[in-house]
Amino acid sequence: MSGKLVLLIGPSGVGKSVILQSLRDNHPDIHFPRSATTRDKREGEGDDLYQFVSDKEFDQLLEEGKVLEYAVVHGQKRYGTLVDEIIPYIDKGDIVIREVDIQGFDSIRNHQYFREDDSGYDLQSIFILPEDHDQLIRHITERAPISDEELKRRIASMEIELAHAAYCDVQIVNKEGKLEETIKEVEGTIFGS
């Protein structure tokens, strides 16, 4: 099997984390890359999800072209997708799965490794859609109480994210109460069954 990078995209509250966890549990052969981050390691946190680096080290990674994409989160800490966590695994024939936001998706699909016209690597993008807007709003508000202002901000962000679904290879609707079916559809898309 030839390797590829699969990007999982979708608005907050749509179920991406649960889908990713199921893929981790059911497919130990899939590679889930670590992110580089400039935030501090939290108590009890290991190195399985993040490579913790200083601002200077992150700048060096950027300068050396070792970051596929990155974002500044909450106005200060940087999180990035490392080339070394993706390309060597694809070269070995592995499937690599990465959850990204729409900015990360745009950066990666336009990166020299993955641009359609001149890339040497296969990129597959899967956008997870809600059944309807109300479903997402319910999921967001059920997680934790949020202010009306924060809810309005998230809804505006959701609208921008949902507009990006058309740019993805596949759109999968995560219907309420049908998570297992959604996971099977994601697996079918990734593995071609």
Image (cartoon, rainbow, N blue to C red):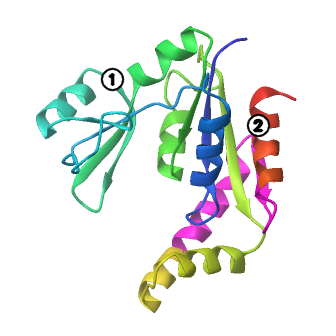
Magenta region includes residue 166: yes
Q: Does residue 42 appear left or right of residue 25 in this picture?
A: left
**As shown in the figure, which amino acid type bears the numbered disc 2?**
Glu
Tag 1–tag 2 contact (CB < 8 Å):
no
Compared to 155, does 87 lie above or below?
A: above
**As shown in the figure, which amino acid type bears the numbered disc 1?**
Lys
Closer-to-camera residue (48/116): 48
Question: What residue occupies the far right of the structure in this picture?
Answer: 193
Question: What residue occupies the far top of the structure in this picture?
Answer: 92
Q: Is mark 1 on a helix, strand or loop?
A: loop
Question: What residue occupies the far front of the structure in this picture?
Answer: 44
Where residue 189 sits in the image (x, y, percent)? 79, 36
Q: Which mark is residue 130?
A: none
Name the residue beneath numbered marker 2: 187
Q: Does residue 156 appear left or right of residue 57 in this picture?
A: right
Where residue 52 sits in the image (x, y, percent)? 23, 37
Name the residue beneath numbered marker 1: 66
- Identified at 62% across, 11% down, the residue is 93
Q: Which of marks 1 and 2 is nearer the N terminus?
A: 1
Where residue 27 sits in the image (x, y, percent)? 66, 29
Name the mark nearer the viewer: 1 or 2: 2
